[in-house]
């Protein structure tokens, strides 16, 4: 059989050659940096060692990681609860309505929102000269009677919730859509009330999706840096700020090895959470298709 | 559903929408309010801060740099990803899992971790190739991989790549022609989506630029915030509006959600684990 003109393989090149640029690129700009972090964590001036991890014992390091866990857990739980409520409010409306489309588009946008802009939005709202702060002051109220908390852990929780809620809506809405009205009718025909329905039917079905969503939100908050960096000007109150400050210390105490060790710990935590999330996601998919 | 329960449900829905609507809209409104404030407390509203943007060379330079990065990243993404994904679909299906894994990997590696490994690479690049801010496009391409991959995957899954390619090949088309003139024109929405998402991610990126000491749009906004809060908030609002417009175009154009292939990438949604802007 004749090969088509201008086509066919004139050179006997292996087929994977065409995919080589992609692998090369990802190798250099994704896998190599990751490898540098992993290997850098185990190398110090004396060669192979675990010395970089010794710093993990220090008070400020432990505090930063604990704060990160606290911040991520709080913002994840609050975000998951409100996100689930919003998702339920959306799911009980017209499935093809414009309102639902508007809310899901808005969530898609807001879940991406973060960083400097988000920090500034909150500064403009409840910062020292913020819109709400001033308005409340005119009415004799002071939200900062006990000190300015916006730039502390509590403030970060509030700001993080802003992108956590929409993210939860995005992951939880498909699970809610999987719930069929017939199941409620079946519960009722068997004599069950609202409580029974939520406790024995919808609750157990939605639990993996809810838990999975919470884990995802946790990972999301744990690895966030830009928002916190824009809001907190100094100090390393959370792990991502600690990594950044160890990496590029302005007072000349930069230590890439120790930064790598911290970064590795963060990656491991995020990876474990994401694996759990994936497992729960699969479990959700089994019931709610 | 009983009337009583329906009423309760409607009240619940209304309460949720009003409460959360306020939570989400007030900070954005407050930014607008803040950016139009006068110098003193009872000065009239003014657009001075907005006008100052154009007269601040540092901000203009940063805006241009970020736009340049957005264009370079989008082009690079298309050149790297489109041919590879088409080729893998046609000829190397056994590699598709590996490609998917690699493309989604940046979602699990926090940017702050990536930057720790990138520092030596960029140090070397600065000394041996170039120290231009545009070199950030190399790593931004990695950041946009998950979003672009998903957009392009949806586009490819919606057309019969194999039949199109075989038809074109049997008529004598070269592989380049197959890709550029047969398959690519069949997925315009997917390509547009991938580009818009890439632009949105690049314009919002702060972490990597900041820690590698480059001044892109977000870093400039943060720096300007220390000198003049009103102006920096005006830029923040402008960049936010721009990103919103991009993403709204995106949500109206595409997402043919109804027809996602059964083996669509197991990615929850855009942005797990601190991608892009956070």
Image (tube, coloured by chain):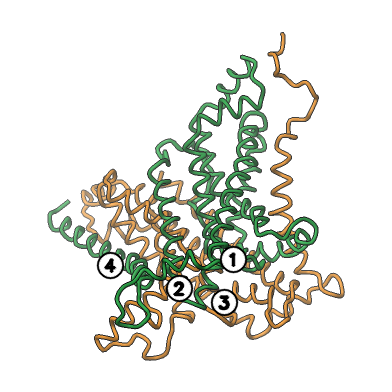
Q: Residue furthest toward the front?
A: B55
Q: Where, quadrant-wise, is the C terminus of chain A in this rendering? A: top left
Structural distance between the alpha carbons of marks 4 and 2: 20 Å
Q: Is residue A19 left or right of residue B182?
A: right
- Which residue sits at x=45%, y=76%? B229
Q: Position of residue B169 (x, y in %)?
A: 63, 18
- Disc 3: CA contacts within 10 A as few (<14), some (14-19) or many (>=20): many
Identify the disc placed on residue B128.
Answer: none
The residue where tag 3 is placed is: A238
Q: Which chain is green?
A: B
- Disc 4: CA contacts within 10 A as few (<14), some (14-19) or many (>=20): few
The residue where tag 2 is placed is: A74
- Label 4 element class: helix
Q: Position of residue A142 (x, y in %)?
A: 32, 87
Q: Earlier in the sequence, mark 3 or mark 2?
A: 2
> What is the chain identity of the residue bearing mark 3?
A
Please tell me whether mark 4 or mark 2 is closer to you in this view.
Answer: 4
- Label 2 element class: helix
Q: Which chain is orange?
A: A
Q: Quadrant of residue B30?
A: bottom left
């Amino acid at each position: 059989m004749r090969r088509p003109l201008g086509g066919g393989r004139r050179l006997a090149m292996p087929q994977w050659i065409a995919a080589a640029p992609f692998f090369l690129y990802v190798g250099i700009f994704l896998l190599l940096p990751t490898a540098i972090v992993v290997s850098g964590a185990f190398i110090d001036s004396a060669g192979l060692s675990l010395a970089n991890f010794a710093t993990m014992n220090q008070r400020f390091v432990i505090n930063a990681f604990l704060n990160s866990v606290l911040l991520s857990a709080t913002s994840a739980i609050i975000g998951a609860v409100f996100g689930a409520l919003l998702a339920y409010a959306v799911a009980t409306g017209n499935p093809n309505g414009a309102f639902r489309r508007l809310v899901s588009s808005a969530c898609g946008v807001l879940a991406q929102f973060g960083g400097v802009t988000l920090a500034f939005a909150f500064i403009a709202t409840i910062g020292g000269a913020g819109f709400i702060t001033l308005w409340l002051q005119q009415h004799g109220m002071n939200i900062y009677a006990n000190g300015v908390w916006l730039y502390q852990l509590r403030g970060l929780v509030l700001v993080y919730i802003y992108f956590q809620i929409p993210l939860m809506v995005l992951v939880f809405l498909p699970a809610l859509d999987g719930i069929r009205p017939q199941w409620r009718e079946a519960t009722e025909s068997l004599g069950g009330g609202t409580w029974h329905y939520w406790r024995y039917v919808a609750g157990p079905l939605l639990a993996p999706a809810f838990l999975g969503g919470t884990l995802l939100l946790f990972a999301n908050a744990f690895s966030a840096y830009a928002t916190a960096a824009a809001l907190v000007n100094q100090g390393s109150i959370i792990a991502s700020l600690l990594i950044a400050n160890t990496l590029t210390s302005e007072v000349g105490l930069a230590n890439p090895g120790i930064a790598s060790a911290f970064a590795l710990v963060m990656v491991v935590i995020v990876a474990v959470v994401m694996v759990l999330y994936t497992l729960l996601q699969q479990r959700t998919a089994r019931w709610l298709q | 559903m009983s009337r009583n329960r329906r009423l309760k449900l409607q009240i619940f829905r209304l309460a949720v929408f009003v409460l959360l609507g306020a939570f989400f809209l007030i900070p954005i409104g407050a930014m607008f309010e803040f950016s139009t404030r006068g110098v003193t407390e009872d000065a009239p509203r003014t657009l001075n801060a907005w006008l100052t943007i154009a007269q601040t060379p540092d901000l203009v330079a940063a805006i241009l740099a970020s736009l340049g990065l957005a264009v370079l990243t989008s082009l690079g993404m298309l050149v790297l990803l489109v041919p590879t994904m088409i080729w893998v679909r046609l000829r190397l299906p056994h590699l598709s899992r590996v490609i998917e894994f690699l493309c989604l990997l940046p979602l699990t590696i926090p940017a702050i971790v990536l930057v720790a490994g990138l520092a030596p690479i960029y140090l070397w690049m600065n000394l041996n190739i170039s120290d231009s801010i545009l070199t950030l496009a190399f790593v931004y391409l990695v950041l946009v991989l998950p979003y672009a991959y998903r957009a392009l995957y949806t586009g490819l899954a919606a057309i019969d790549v194999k039949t199109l390619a075989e038809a074109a090949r049997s008529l004598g088309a070269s592989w380049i022609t197959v890709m550029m003139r047969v398959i690519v024109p069949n997925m315009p929405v997917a390509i547009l989506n991938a580009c818009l998402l890439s632009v949105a991610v690049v314009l919002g990126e702060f972490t990597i630029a900041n820690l590698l000491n480059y001044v892109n749009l977000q870093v400039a906004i943060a720096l300007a915030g220390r000198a003049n809060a009103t102006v920096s908030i005006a830029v923040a609002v402008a960049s936010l509006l721009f990103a919103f417009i991009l993403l709204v175009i995106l949500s109206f154009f595409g997402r043919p959600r109804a027809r996602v292939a059964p083996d669509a990438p197991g990615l929850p949604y855009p942005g797990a684990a601190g991608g892009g802007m956070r």
